[in-house]
Image (spheres, grey):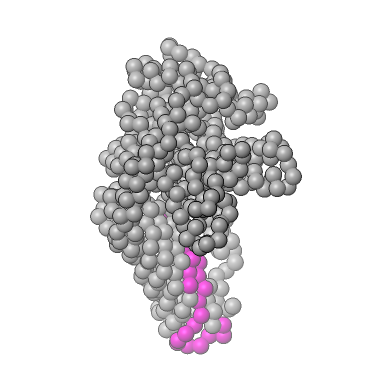
Amino acid sequence: MGSLIRPRYLARALILCVLGVASVCGALETDQYYAWTQPLADSTAALNAKLNLELELAIEHVAARNGEELPQCTDIAERLMKQLHFTTFQDFELWTLNTTLIDRYPANPEQELEYRQSNLYHRHGVLDVSTWLPNVPTIEVNGIRLGTDKLAHFVSSGWRWHREYVKELERGLSHEEAERQILDSGLYWERSLMGSLATGVFSPGDLEANYRGMEYYYSLCHGEEPVLESSAAGWEIRRPFDFSTVIGPEWDESYNTPIYSKRRWRKVRPVLVGYCEELNHPAVQERRDYYRSIERTTRIGEELDRMISEDIVPDPYQFSIEANCAGASVARERISRTTGNLGLPENGPPDPQLIEEIRAIDSNLERRPVGTLGLNFSYPDRLGGSVGVLWARLPAHYDCMTLCPFEGPFLQLQGGWNAVRLSGGWARIIGEKKNNRFFVSDVYVGLGFKASLLHTYGDPPSEEAGRTFAGGEFEFTIVQINFRGGIYHRIAGPKPDDPWLLTLTVGWGF
């Protein structure tokens, strides 16, 4: 192919893409201190109903696909994962950010704006890529406060841990040996690209959610009493899942404190000590007393103890609010009192009426056109811009003023100094409209596949004006930074020595 982009430019763009993705793929952070004194309704029933509904939908989908043939249990587990999972932002978490059934704080665009300007991680440099993603709100489950990012860890990283765990068992390892491999790998990634190295934050709470997610996925089809059982009628849920049996104080990052790198701690500590006055608030003290009464030793906690004793990581207590507030009324040790499940009553089976209510609400979908904008530098267009329309299929009650998933057919027009393109295809965008009625104001993650027509004019580099090409493009956006690549074949205009054309675009937006 004669009309190619110079390899060094392509290599540089790919390196930037890899670094950008690595910096943000584990960068969703939360600030439980921010919601300390805010009342929150308990969300256990809604979360239980939603997850068990998704499992029912997975069973129904796989059964319909297989017809009369009974599917494998693992097919249902994999289908469940696909319903809940997407890059960086998981659909299960996005549901909690948009449904009226989950009480959260912050909960609207005005509160979100204030949160982003004053939360625990708001002090950062312009080039601190790991902070470009929004911080997530706090919810309450059975009296425990947690960020919605923990639900994303549960359904996403939990699946990855489960998949690797099963692979280790299939290799002949014992359950203890397989778990050891998974913990070593998980702790490594949390200390590197998925945690400390990318964001300066090592979160034991994230690891707790990962581990519990692994247990959940494994329990669907394995163990003495799997969640799913087969009968003449097909697969059924024998044991509905209850989040209150796995979520404990260790999921609250204001109690199970993260470990910060030196650079992150310099920026976090001044904000943390600003919460000192709230430490003695009656609601805060009551909650922390409650946590102390039910805290337990977990498998992740045991591993953290080992790493602290071997000087692999520092003791997180030094980053706690008690250790940094003069005269703190309670100085606690890290979670290490009891083992096993929480000493709390389970919530019991999910409410069938609530499950059907969620099914009805979520299935009431409507098509909405949403606009996208972009600025870019590309070959052969050079400097230019784009405007697009995506026809998203969304639940009718989503207002998308905060994070929202937009997915559907996509039409885009891109123009530059030396070329114009018209493209159509499919795209999925995770972004928010804020107070804008039509355009997505911030695109945090975007993925698109398009068929395109490209026409050159002016004085394009390494090309003649007046040529028309047809081809396809792949587009990817992470925190507003857009990468696009395409391959085209000439269909009209002056005949070149090589009819093929490769394109590359780097820009902003989608």
Q: x%, y% of residue 454?
A: 43, 76
Given residues 337 and 371, the one toward you in this image is 337
Given residues 60 and 184, the one toward you in this image is 60
Q: x%, y% of residue 215?
A: 57, 38
Given residues 69 and 200, the one toward you in this image is 69
Q: Is residue 508 above or below residue 501?
A: above
**173 magenta-colored:** no
Q: x%, y% of residue 266?
A: 48, 29
321 sits left or right of 185 in the view: left
**Measuring 35% from the left and 31% from the top, which residue is drawn there?**
42
Q: Is residue 493 above or below residue 362?
A: below
Magenta stretch in the rendered image:
472-498
Q: Residue 326's image quarter?
A: top left
**Measuring 44% from the left and 73% from the top, which residue is drawn there?**
451
User: Where does the N terminus fall, quadrant-wise?
Assistant: bottom right
Would residue 88 be seen by someone viewing this image from the given angle? no
**Measuring 37% from the left and 39% from the top, which residue is drawn there?**
351
